[in-house]
Image (cartoon, rainbow, N blue to C red):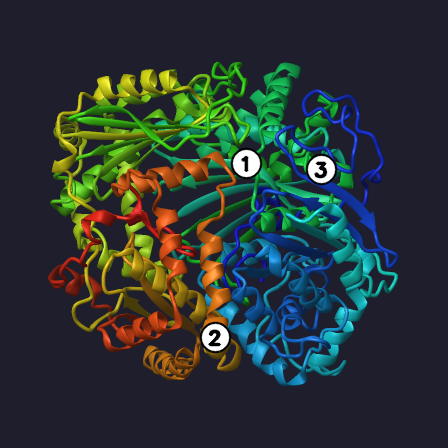
Amino acid sequence: MPLLPRFRPLGLSAAIAAIVLAGLSPGAVLADANSTPGSAQNVSVNAQTGPVIKSENDKRSYRSLTLNNGLRVLLVSDPGADKAAAAMDVEVGSAQDPKDVLGLAHFLEHMLFLGTDRYPDPDAYQDFITKHGGNHNAFTASQDTNYFFDIEPEAFDEALPRFARFFVAPQFNAEYVDRERHAVNSEYQARMQDDGRRVYEAVEKALNPEHPFNRFSVGSLDTLQDTDAGSLRQRLVDFYTAHYGAGVMRLSLVGPQSLDALEKLTRSNFSDVPNRDLKRPEIDIPLVTQGELPARLEVKALKQERELAFMFPIDDPIEHYRTQPVSYLANLIGHEGEGSLLAALKAKGWADALSAGGGLSDGHNAMLSIDITLTPEGAKHQPEIRAALFDYLALVRKQGINDWRYAEQAKLGEQKFRFQQRSSPVDLASSLAMMMTRYPVKEVLAAPYLMQNFDAALLDKTLARLTQDNLLEVYSGPNVAGDEQGQWFKAPYTLTRLSDDDATSSAATDGASASTADSLANQLALPAPNPYLASDFRVLELPNAAPTQLLDEPGAELWYQGNDSFGVPQAEWRFGLLNPEISSSVEEQVMSRVLAAWLNESLNARLYPARLAGQDALAYAHGRGITLQFSGWRDGQQPEMREVLDQLVNGEIVPATLERITQRLRRNLQNRAQAPLYSQLGRSLSETLIGPLATTPQMMAALDTVNSQTLDAFRKHFLARLHVQAMVTGNLTAKQASDTGQLVVNGLAPRVTREAIPTLEVRQISQQTALRPNSTRSDAGALRYLQGEDRTLQSQARLAVLGQLIEAPFYSRLRTDEQLGYIVSASYSPMLDAPGLSMLVQSPSKDSKTLFSRMDAFMTEFDTRVQALDESALTSYRQAVIDSLTQKPRRLSELAARNWNELSFGWTGFDRRQQLVAAVKQVNPEDIRATWQRLRNADSLELAFDPGTPSDFDQRIPKLALPALPEAPRAQAEATTSAPSAQPTSNAQH
């Protein structure tokens, strides 16, 4: 499927995620790889030689080559990489599905993994990758299918042949065809209640039905079956032969190996990929045809969310990627500062968010979309909101096409590119492979940042398409009835075709509404020159040293680690505002969330230009208080900190703003039951074991008590009982850190000692516990959690290795062999620093009792594997955990997060990872056997959901009496999260 994982999730880079989500068009109209861009106004491209234009921060080496079979390749040698990675992008996707076998491209993506001529075992690839500390994934987009993996560098030369044979001689075994079509159907069933898919299916009905983007792409049992044209397997083989060939593939390898070594691996493994003389399919069918617009579409949403989208067909901007006309206009329309459309709508209490940008694109046609998240009140004023949007667009036409605005955006793009930090090898490989289909190889890194040629005529031409007679207006909300229903995702919708006169009259309003629209128009203004632009970009040379304490007072502590290794003049600040009473009641917890949300919201318009300039400020609540986070250029952080502090201490709590915030928080609580089932089960696990045992009804009731007076009283009480724990990591001197940190401490005047702040507790599963969370999903789900006996490093190490061992066989048995569902996983899943294993299955066809019974059977089967485990078999799994723990941070933000975790758990030696590595090295087969046996005999926590069975979660949670899990001995005081593969939860923030 397009974005969701088949195995363990790997994140997509921002650039590639944008391409997948927007369906960006191919680079068929672009210059070849040797073309020279026009005069540069931002990223300095002409001064660079070599295969790619890269940031001056980028120390990697690149090589571009084309094999004899026509396969184009980009190699990246990164001596500092902890992993090696490969990605293959195939220039075919769901847009090429045969009309009688919808979902075939996605089905092929699934089938490709299940054995090749040289590696026929369907689990061989996955087992090898997992055994050597790697991950793999793939996605199917409209015009691309992208396959990628990463692994320990030492195993790369053995992994590549397994990967390469997918594109040479996949088996497509008939025995797996029916099994895997059920897996695809499970994936489809799991997403049927996703509002995004439901709305998009309705949007497809408003556009040209002949366009290949406007049809079902996931696949189901109804679409993936034998036809008169041949069996499903034969259609699969035919599709592969017709669309998979070296000439329409792009390969990228990234690793610490030399370029020569990478080239040798490429030629030895990928020269056999057949060419087949294929070209990327071109879509020449219009996205919208005469008479289809203007139109209005209303779609029923399952969540308590109201969205209003304005979608305008435009020419695909890919040809003008060096000018970025859509990016320029989207920046103006989506601005959130004072005078912006969003600020005006927020002031009326009508909107919570607004975004603008490119949407669907196919090489010829595209969509520019403006999306507004409405409040319930805003949903009643859609005509006025529409009128305000077109007033703002008129303002952009009149005053917004300026070379100084373009130069400012270009300057910010240049700064981002110049100080680009490293991404993971697999993110880079996947992104490069796809970018090579869009842009000349030389510009695959720079293209998203280029703004070189101010072209007022081009901007005016694009703006000219943003009119009421060229508009698809889409409203989605829970109150829509609908007179039709989507075929696949079953959303009720109403589509109304409008004439040009209807579109014009729909913008007209009655007297009262017209007065409101005029009032809104008077509030609109285009952004002024950004006052927050940084100017000091010197990277200071600093010693490589561990964090040290600069401030040690009864009420405050400040820790500092200077760093120049990332080559960025930036600093990451965390100020933990810790209060000993914050977790004493549900009301205190809810108030802290409201206070943090109010602080963010009340400063959004004022500080939005700072965010654009690279200065970010964020407040978030957690179990011990509120953390203030500041990230960005070293130059200019103090003014932003002063504004945040002043607002926190003295800012007026405007009732209308607070009402919008509490409404949003209330909707978030109401929407929990509509979340993906696996997500809801995971959240319930975290809520059961960490933090106050608060139920959704209790939090809703607490929100009902919030008003300006009660929040102001809480603010004063909260600020009067603070201990400030601060950490800064970045490119600044100790004196700069001390001066800035002291500024914040002085502004807060904390009085509470660190000893008064409670430690972070994890509850012990001291009795067999079964709970049923609430969900509206149609699948069944089962999550079993096996908890370690304590929080020592030894327990963490043993369960981390055990998690590495159990991951692949659990997936192979319950997902691949038994086909219980699409979402299947077993992994090491610590709660804070408390180790544990989680087993999860979500199924469209089996109930939770059956799922737990199949887990039982697997655990019995796994007993044999554990008993047979010897040192030689254990070595690679243990090393995979060590490799994960010793992975170097790639970005300043990663280093800052590590430091903050260590400090927040009291590990002031900042060496927890090193100590955990030492503990992992000591794990032997007997340790694994003893640990597994203890888990088998211990009580577990089971979370189950079956459609139609009532939830007991909110009734039982307040009465649940679980003691605290024993902490580590004081010598190991409060080690932080030890998760090679753990995903942080909101409750774990601090």
Marked residue nearer the N-terminal end (3 or 1): 3
| Between marks 2 and 1 in the image, the one whose residue lies nearer the viewer | 2
> Crowdedness of circle 3 by 10 Å Cα count: few (<14), some, many (20+)?
many
Residue drawn at (57%, 53%), measured in percent from left and top? 203
In this rendering, the answer to whether 548 lies above or below 27 is above
Q: What residue appears at the point 17 percent right and 32 percent down from the top-left corner?
A: 711
The disc labelled 3 sits on which kind of residue? Pro
Marks 3 and 1, how far apart at CA: 15 Å
Tell me the CA gap for discs 2 and 1.
44 Å
Q: Is residue 523 toward the left or the right of residue 410 in the image?
A: left
Residue situated in front as seen by the camera: 613 or 676: 613
Height in image: 263 above or below 608?
Answer: below
Q: Earlier in the sequence, mark 2 or mark 1?
A: 1
Residue 285 appears at what percent x and percent y? 76, 53
Q: Secondary structure at mark 3?
A: helix
Name the kind of residue labelled 1 in the image.
Ala
Query: Dots 3 and 1: beta carbons under 8 Å?
Result: no
Q: Residue 62 versus residue 801: which sits nearer the camera?
A: 801
The residue beneath circle 2 is 809
- Residue that numbered label 1 is attached to: 356
Q: Indicate the amino acid at tag 2.
A: Pro
